Image (tube, rainbow, N blue to C red):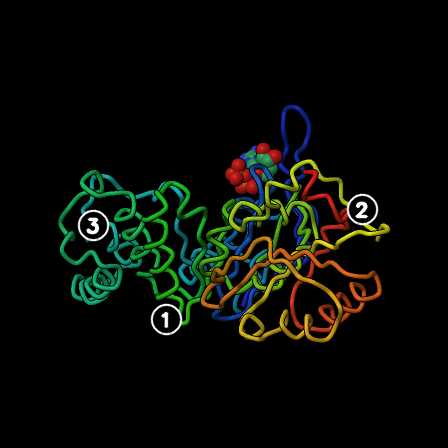
Amino acid sequence: MIKLTGIEKVYPGTNGAVHALKGINLEVRRGEIFGVIGKSGAGKSTLIRCINMLERPTRGSVVVDGEELTTMSEKNLRERRKKIGMIFQHFNLLSSRTVYENVAFPLELAGKSKTEIAQAVLPLLELVGLADKRDQYPSQLSGGQKQRVGIARALASRPKVLLCDEATSALDPQTTQSILKLLFDINQKLQLTIVLITHEMQVIKEICDRVAVIENGVIIEEGPVLDVFTRPQTATTREFIRTIVNHDLPEFFANTVFSPTPLPDSNLILRLSFIGRTAEEPIIAGMIRRFNVDTSILYGNIDHIKHTPFGTLIVELSGDQAGIQNALNYLRARDLGIEVIGYVARNARAVG
Ligand SMILES: Nc1ncnc2c1ncn2[C@@H]1O[C@H](COP(=O)(O)OP(=O)(O)OP(=O)(O)O)[C@@H](O)[C@H]1O
């Protein structure tokens, strides 16, 4: 649905040029919710604005629904942009217009009749749950309600793609949840392709199918959200995940130095992630039965990524080193995420 190839963006600046995007390649499939996460200044806004040419890339190609946008005239671009809706962090509503008039605005610009506009706007207000607020002004609405107006307005020209520029960053956690649920419902009902940018991993976890992590204008990691959560490849991704998944070790390990290799008389500490069906399989029980190892569960948690169960366990394996290695190999052959935290002297916990 969207294909970005070799996208570079250089902003000229008084203190020298800023290379905001340095060769981005990205493909977003039809009907999916694709998230781009990155820290402040990573290039997220620039990237999402390149998709609808609000920002023209310095180099590279942007294809949306089979059409190359970078070589298109402004006139043709204006037409194509109707198929790419956008919502913003600060909603960008017109304060002198009512809810109804804000949603009607793009249709008025497109020259639609009053009847056509009413036929389009009223169902949209129903869809976003604001039918009873149609005559209110933005100043009379909460942040969440304003974003609902933004969403209805973005959908008015029946886009195929919805771009969300930090759409929930100005909202409290509960309102964020309700807006994310609305975006998910719209994605399902209208088969709309959604691209969102965010600095919050919670947003990615709630609704995205796939995610790309951007840093310094480069995509450093990309994949299905479940894979990225359970097998993060970069320190930055691990940092983002840590904001929502408890990665802290139990307190009694606070001063422990872990060895990456076995020491004499040491126990192995592992962090295991179970996804979907593996969360229901008796993997640990199977391991204990087969190998001569004792297993202590130090931490356990179950959560959901989109609608898939996702469990985390921190376990300590003790026994002879051959047994521990066999148990580790057994776990590695299973479909679960394994992070070797390290080996600790057998008495570490008593001492720590
Ligand atoms: N119009 C501009 N002129 C010059 N430099 C710019 C312009 N817009 C962005 N930049 C620079 O490009 C880089 C990427 O900015 P961008 O806004 O895309 O990042 P971001 O990840 O969206 O950050 P934030 O979350 O803080 O908005 C930054 O170094 C920024 O200062």
Query: 45 or 142: which is nearer to us?
Result: 142
Residue holding disc 2: 259
Q: Amino acid type of disc 3?
A: Val
Image coordinates for residue 345, horizontal then vertical, percent: 78, 46
Left/right placement of residue 129 relative to residue 341 reads left
Report if residue 344 is visible in the image: yes
What's the mark number on residue 333?
none
Q: Nearer the viewer, mark 2 or mark 3?
A: 2
Q: Amino acid type of disc 1?
A: Leu
Which image quarter is the N terminus in?
Answer: bottom right
Quadrant where ligand 1 appears: top right
Residue holding disc 3: 99
Which image quarter is the C terminus in?
Answer: top right
Would you identify the image quadrant in which residue 223 lies? Answer: bottom right
Would you identify the image quadrant in which residue 156 lies? Answer: bottom left
Q: CA distance from mark 1 to mark 3?
A: 22 Å
> Residue at the location (68% across, 51% down)?
220
Please tell me which of labels 1 and 2 falls first in the chain: 1
- Callout 2: few (<14), some (14-19), or many (20+) C-alpha neighbours within 10 Å? some
